[in-house]
Amino acid sequence: MERILIDETPNLIGQIVKLQGWVNIRRDHGKLIFIDLRDRSGKIQMVIIPDKEETHKTAKEVRAEYIIEVEGLVKARPGGAKNEKIPTGGVEIEVEKLNIISKPEVELPVDVSAEDLNLNLDTLLDNRTITLRNEKVKAIFRIYAEMISAYARIMKQESFTEIKTPKILNAATEGGANFFKIKYFDKEAYLAQSPQFYKQAGVAIFERVFEVGSVFRAEPHYTTRHVNEYIGLDAEMGFIGNFEEVMAELEKVMAYVMQEVAQKCQGELEMYGAQILPVEKIPRMKLTEALDILDKEYGKKMETVDIDAEGERLICEWVRKNHNCDFVFLTHYPTAIRPFYSMPSPDPQYTETFDLLFMGVEIASGGQRIHDYNHLIASMKKHGLNPEDFKHYLDVFKYGIPPHGGWGLGSERIVQKMLGLGSIKQAILFPRDVKRLTP
Amino acid sequence: MERILIDETPNLIGQIVKLQGWVNIRRDHGKLIFIDLRDRSGKIQMVIIPDKEETHKTAKEVRAEYIIEVEGLVKARPGGAKNEKIPTGGVEIEVEKLNIISKPEVELPVDVSAEDLNLNLDTLLDNRTITLRNEKVKAIFRIYAEMISAYARIMKQESFTEIKTPKILNAATEGGANFFKIKYFDKEAYLAQSPQFYKQAGVAIFERVFEVGSVFRAEPHYTTRHVNEYIGLDAEMGFIGNFEEVMAELEKVMAYVMQEVAQKCQGELEMYGAQILPVEKIPRMKLTEALDILDKEYGKKMETVDIDAEGERLICEWVRKNHNCDFVFLTHYPTAIRPFYSMPSPDPQYTETFDLLFMGVEIASGGQRIHDYNHLIASMKKHGLNPEDFKHYLDVFKYGIPPHGGWGLGSERIVQKMLGLGSIKQAILFPRDVKRLTP
């Protein structure tokens, strides 16, 4: 007999089926044994009656997280006994045969069948290979998978070409210090902090490119929104008239991604009480306007033209209240706090750049880039960089490139905020931070 | 006026359109100037007549790789003047206005408009940001993008969950020596040589997982099929009965990927004279059987039960001749040359593992894994490894995991062989090898 998945059972009432999966929990009611079985498609209740002696004996051995195979009859549950919480709650399996396929050597330190694990972050992450088995924890990564898949689909639809660029670099990009150093044969190399240079090179080849790839940041942060390795959703597009077009494209992308996740992950979102607002027009405001609002509405003053984590949280709160939107574009960041390749605004104190905030946190940075060779060299010098260190990057511009811009999205923050997770680390299967290299 | 793409022009005969793109080549015929314009959608011929004085003057300045914007009339070309080689060969643009958007500072060292660049590998790669502009070179990466996208689609259809696992590890996985070392804050860390351990952990969570991600190998190879950084297409599936099921799944995946590429990249494949055979049943033979064939048919003897690059090439030749198939599974590799986690065969000298060869080269390795905790520990010891170094990995098994297996595919080799490229480096935008960290 071929194994079927649990979610197929409601259509097979009256038939004998074979199932395989994990024992979520076993409950004994007198001589009846109930087992909730879990596979990749869902959960189902099984009942083992004492008449089946051999099967009943094996069922008595079974504990949580045993991996078993059963054959049994799919039966409709009487009205009062239905479990409305799960799609297979209208049926149960009357088990005929039960085999143990594999079992834990020791009892699990965590009850993964709990609706909510309620563990502190370190315990959750220290026991990651176990805690990830919990349905609610697993739901995060179902959503994550849907999200990155939707991102790739919409980018393709918008005629962006998918690229994969090197993560080992010979020079520290963007002139920053926060790079991990590698021993690369007899040389030194660095881990890519962003695919910035390569995606710009991509514009000169394909006009529009996107990448889903690893990003490494050697920043010693201890916050709820930083990790040292994450997956970036990058894009870069040529032949733009201005950076508004980049924001318009990103708006379209986020609208699609949010809609896809809302439609395809209803059950998972419900577990977190998460509601996704449809994305239509994302409000855009200058950073200076945002700072004015923070001052006037919240009495918060920044010392320089910049915004901090609290400011981002508050401005999102304000936008949600006044525009019923979970997103906002802050634009025109000062030249001093943006990378050298940022296109200056007509007032050269500012840049044609933006951050996209979502539910209180920055999820993307982007803008128009300088595309003129000599302009770029001048900007490098202004930022204290030596153009000779950037020969290969400059070649892209030396041989001509159209006006272009793009963005870098942090994939995990999107899911973190969508579900209201306390830390970004909850949205990463096996996160890496200053102290954490395992599991 | 909104810019349109070149491939839309055949439907717009008689209309004035705006185009943007790169000058592929300019030819002057007396006072007529012909420019081949290229954008992400294709190429088109434009003609500038002397009557438009201003436009004609600007057109005279234009050189190869200038980035321009034109407005002009779409005209049908008379029968004899049609260019059957390109989809827009039936039309041309009579240019009204021409603006230079951006231009090279210096002339390009390579004529990117050539049908075939005919450069040696080093020149091709040293000038990568330029040589990638060539249509035939670009075609490789259109195919590559389609291939990895098709892989993700079929994996999703087959109910594999997409995962992203860490590339920074605290321990050298698989006990090998070929790891790049990183300075990770005050610790030492390593770059992932494969997502092996994490995808196995994924089986205990999602049953079926796949990953498209960076793989780093510190092997000092100088061959046409090795690089030090590549994109792995990994998968792992639980509840298998045997490793034949893993091969059957991979067969289904390759059939889909090949079919998608064949359908969606016809033009690109034609440029390389590449023909994709439909994948039906991929022949499977034991490694020992393959060695017998090599001995009998080609007089090639191996000293141990193993196969080398030449052997892989010859056995593929033989399979192509005898089975009309570009793929072959070699199975049952000896325990001694497989990783410790490989499931032994009933004859424990051999393993339930396979390599998938494609057009002469190994593109995937896979098999069934040991899922029993104590069996795994015993196997580690037999391979001279200390189980204490693998605590987090062993936890996955300590708490129970179903029988499972999977594969790791090298994405770039697939495209390399499909197109008959001399080196795998031609199938990577910016390859990394022992000597090459730039561009």
Image (spheres, coloured by chain):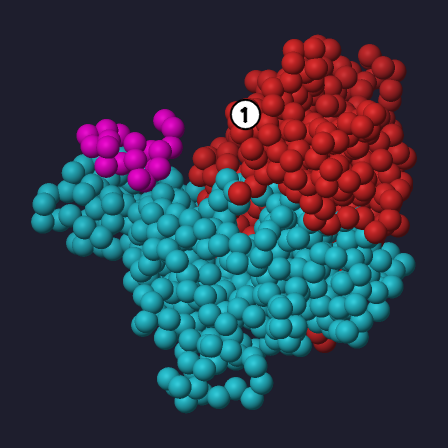
Chain colours: A cyan, B red
Q: Residue at x 59, y 53 (%)?
A: A241
Instruction: Report x, y in % for residue B256.
Output: 54, 27
Q: Is residue B341 left or right of residue A326?
A: right
Where residue B273 sits, quadrant-wise, is: top right
What span is colored magenta in the figure? A1-19
Q: Which residue is mark 1?
A: B14
Name the kind of residue labelled 1 in the image.
Gly
Where residue A214 sits, quadrant-wise, is: bottom right
Q: Is residue B47 left or right of residue B281?
A: right
Q: Residue at x 73, y 61 (%)?
A: A191
One can see residue B296 in this view: yes
Q: Is residue A15 magenta?
A: yes
Task: Examine the rendered structure and indicate whether residue B180 appears above or below residue B349.
Answer: below
* Closer to us: B225 or A61: B225
Q: SS for tag 1?
A: loop
Instruction: Report x, y in % for residue A194.
Output: 66, 60
